[in-house]
Amino acid sequence: MEYKDYYQTLGVSRNSSKDEIKKAYRKLAMKYHPDRNPNDKAAEDRFKDINEAYQVLSDPAKRQRYDQLGDSYSRWQQTGGSSDSYNWQEWFSQGQPTGGRRVDVRDFEDLFGGSFSDFFNSIFGGMASTTPRQRQRSVPANYEQSVSISLAEAYHGTKRSLQINNHRYEVKIPAGSQSGTKVRIAGAGPANQTGAKGDLYLVINVTPETNFVRKGSDLYTESKIDLSTAVLGGQVTIKTLSGSVSLTIPAGTQPGQTFRLAGRGMPQLKNKTAHGNLFVKIKVVIPKQLTDKQRDLFEKLRSE
């Protein structure tokens, strides 16, 4: 059996903090999630490896035991030993650390449609609290699942239907959500030995939008105007996430000049009546070809 380097799987160092491990996991889970990589077996396998690594490194008890195995296996390699000749049975038979939480491989299969590796199951399949009383009081595990939504869905709010353990959940994703926002589905996780169910947290990923850049509650966009509008002024139509609005361009507007449309940005997650602003950067389109009449007018203008 091959040794699995969970730190390498998540791209973190062995002394990384819990927050650093969580950040690395979220980034990779969003990248390789099956919803973003349909019919991609390699991405599906990578997603399973990422979840398995996070299940270990995010739990202090499991991480401690894994680090102990890593130290032992590293010393074995330094003597010239290989994974085939390492005495795995001796390691597995050692006493399990106390205070951990039993891991049921079926939990992961039911929730994500995947499974833990033999390596994981051999090391952690028997981890449990020290006494039956403690096991009964153990807190059921919570799980995270990434969900991608568009910027328009983040603006208006949206819904997702999820089928978990033969139960359908209609989940509301609130307006103002941004990447990293969590939506809790109480009791949607698998049950532990006592029958208690953990929660499922949907971790929102807002996909990039071509016409807008989001910074907090503010949005940034660009609008092209012709040279005559920049010089003489006029009206231009600006598309926003709540519909089109008219923007007055004053005479003498310079290329790159930015106008603020108050309240046309994203709704704030905890205050739906409050919105950010929309900033419109002006791009002046200079004609590459002129008619004879246009050229004559520009020549007259230059001579004055």
Image (cartoon, grey):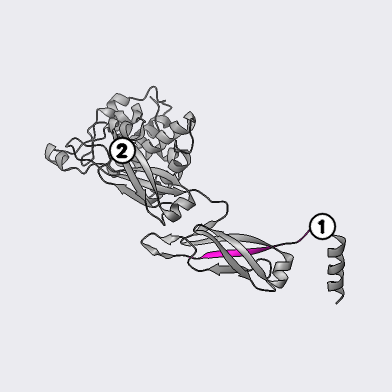
* Disc 2 element: strand
| Image x and y of residue 83, in percent | 40, 25
The quarter of the displayed image where residue 174 is located:
bottom left
Query: Looking at the picture, does residue 68 appear above or below residue 80?
Result: below
Disc assigned to residue 289: 1
- Callout 2: 10 Å neighbours few (<14), some, many (20+)? few
Which quarter of the image is occupied by the C terminus?
bottom right
Whether residue 135 appears in magenta in the rendering, the answer is no
Whether residue 280 appears in magenta in the rendering, the answer is yes
- The one nearer the camera, 231 or 189, is 231
| Image x and y of residue 162, in percent | 35, 39
**Residue on which disc 2 sits:** 168
- Residue range (magenta): 276-287
Marks 2 & 1, CB-CB < 8 Å contact: no
The reply to whether residue 277 is visible in this rendering is: yes
Q: Amino acid at mark 1?
A: Gln
Q: Main secondary structure of the magenta part?
A: strand
| Image x and y of residue 107, in percent | 28, 34
Q: Is residue 233 left or right of residue 197?
A: right
Residue at x 38% of width, y 38% of height: 51
